[in-house]
Image (cartoon, rainbow, N blue to C red):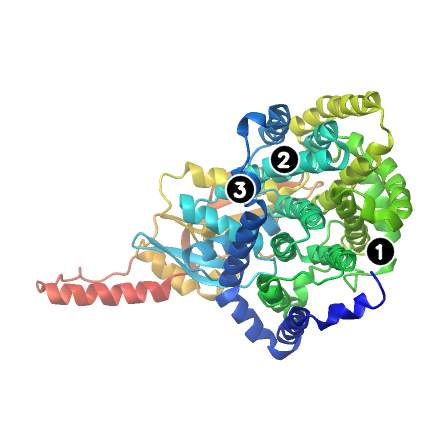
Amino acid sequence: MTPSAFPALFTDKRLWLFLLSGALAVVLGFYAIPGNAAINLVSKSGYWFLLAAFLLFLRALWQTFGDDLRTLDWRRLDWVSVAVVGLGGIVLLVHETFGFKIVMDELMLLGTSMSMHFDKTVLTPTRGNDIQGAFVVLDGIMDKRPLFFPFLLSLVHDLTGYRPANAFVLNGVLAFVLLGLANLGGRLLAGRRAGWLAVLLLAGLPLLAQNATGGGFELLNVVMILATLLLGARFVQKRDEASLTALCFSTLLLGQTRYESLIYVLPVVILVLWVWWEERRVILSWPVILAPLLLLPYPLQHRIFELRTSAWQMGRAFGDKSDATVPFSLAYVPDNLAHAVKFFFASATDQPNSLTLSVLGWIAVPFSLLFIAKRLRTLRTEPPAVVAAVIFTAGFAVQFAVMMGYFWGQFDDPVIRRLSLPTHLWLVVAVLLVLPQFAAAGFQRLLLGVAAFGLLASGVPSMAEHAYTQEYLPGRETAWRREFMADQPRHDYLMIDNDSILWVSHQVSATTVPEVLKRREALAWNMRNRTFAAFYVFQRYNIDPETGVLSLREGDDLGPDFVLEPVREERLQTLTLTRISRIKEVRQGGASLTAPEGGPPPVVPKSRAEIEKLRKAYLENFIKQLP
């Protein structure tokens, strides 16, 4: 671009409108709307923001790929590659058990999708009851987690009916989408065999299988990163408004998938500016001009971290992190790097890693950086996929650096290792970037053999054994609770559990221990009136290894006035006992609060109007007394 052409960019009115839209979004998102009002606004309108962005994204995809789809000849498809993707997806799904793997995230996402499905609001239910056959949410909280995954899950509920297992269906489909995109990316970067190599490397990663069979948003995050990279390549190739719109809205939805994924706005901005520079013109569409305003829910929802300091979960990391005082610091980097090395190169029985991908990927990363340094000046002559991959490497590197500076950034932690998935994707992209430098077909076949051997010799046995899931007790307890639910012929019981979201999201009446202790008279009223078939409480006991004495986990104790009868218990982990008990009686000062009250039998009115009046009065009181 000539020096005189660059100032000409700033004479385009659409660019100024885009900058104005961005400035307005910054003012509204970070300054103009107070904290609590911001949270309420996201709760009431977050669903509709996501729906508008998603529909514009689908429209842009059709505009940029419509002609390709209309002229597609199915008989000329590469069915071998389709088979490789299909077999890779099957490997990821058949060895792991479907279930909620990381409870603190997955149940919150499921609960949010429930409110999005039923009420089109953003709320995570914490109290709910079955009232005359209709399940009603009585209380909830605004969650900190981004909204795109629960939004997509709510669409699945809309189409198929509300089922908690829809989360597993969605992630199962996303597993095949990811492998399909990986095959396409490999093909664009280094040829047909490279596409197969990318699929084999990802299919041999047990961590990916764990997330493909879970209910979290990690798989969607990796899918959106890779999709955005490929749409970036499409924009470099087409350089038109439709491809730009698809790229920008993919980036917007990616930013609404995980907190740190907004990092990938950086490579997208660099890529767009690079294309503008090469084209000597501004390429913008009206949806892109409005896009910053559609991203408003992200900064508004982020106010939760200002209003609730507990949202950072400081001190709750696996192991002792009580000395952590800030979420991000360079002081965390050395320790986190050591944990990352342990994770990537650990035995497959200890961590859900892939030694094949780790070795090949980390060898390829420095070579890919050297390749990028050499090609930066000649990017205009490179294929579009290479341009996009080169620029997106900056996003991968920044994301990895952010995780290494995070106080809870230990990749070998059972809760945190899922956050390494974008880095695993970086390793795959690095291998694909370097691969064309080794033009010999024999070398590519050798790498395919190594990847296939790693999948069969390490990946599949590790997935089949999944020993790495056994150390995360909340996940095992969640699966145990779901077994209890499945064994009950009817959901007409009340469960008291501090993890009440699990029960409410499965449409089982539930409340928490603090709520029951605060309103014990209400619980006693329900027990006297038999409004539920049974009243249960979930508790975890710690076992003293010396004495064998059981001690209740903090927050699980109902106190001595509650008479409990154990109905199911299991030792899911060493030195813990998980138990569900039936509440037989509630006492106070030696007197029973739940025994039927004495007195003459009630007189049933003969008037239908009087009966209806009493029924309505009872129902109103019943709703007030719900625990």
Q: Nearer the viewer, residue 593 or 206?
A: 206
Q: Earlier along the polypeptide chain: callout 1 or callout 2?
A: 2
**Distance CA(mark 2)–CA(mark 3):** 15 Å
Q: Is residue 218 above or below residue 591?
A: above
- Quarter of the image with the N terminus is bottom right
Q: Where does label 2 land, which residue?
A: 180
Q: Is residue 65 left or right of residue 507?
A: right
| Count of picture labels | 3
Image x and y of residue 35, in percent? 60, 74
Identified by mark 2, the residue type is: Gly
Q: Earlier along the polypeptide chain: callout 1 or callout 3?
A: 3
Instruction: Choose top left, top right, bottom left or bottom right for residue 173.
Output: top right
Identified by mark 1, the residue type is: Tyr
Q: Residues within 10 Å of mark 1 (few under 14, many from 20)?
A: some
Instruction: Choose top left, top right, bottom left or bottom right for residue 586.
Output: bottom left
Tell us which disc is closer to us: 1 or 3: 3
Taking the image as drawn, is residue 559 in sight? no
Q: Is the Cβ of the residue at disc 1 closer than 8 Å to that at disc 2?
A: no
Image x and y of residue 265, in percent? 71, 58
Q: Where does label 3 land, which residue?
A: 170
Q: Is residue 493 left or right of residue 374?
A: left
Q: Is residue 566 above or below residue 624?
A: above
Q: Residues within 10 Å of mark 3 (few under 14, many from 20)?
A: many
Instruction: Choose top left, top right, bottom left or bottom right for residue 411.
Output: top right
Q: Is residue 417 left or right of residue 17?
A: right
Q: Where does label 1 land, which residue?
A: 332
Secondary structure beneath label 3? helix
Instruction: Give the residue displayed 62% in from the left and 79% down from the top.
Output: 32
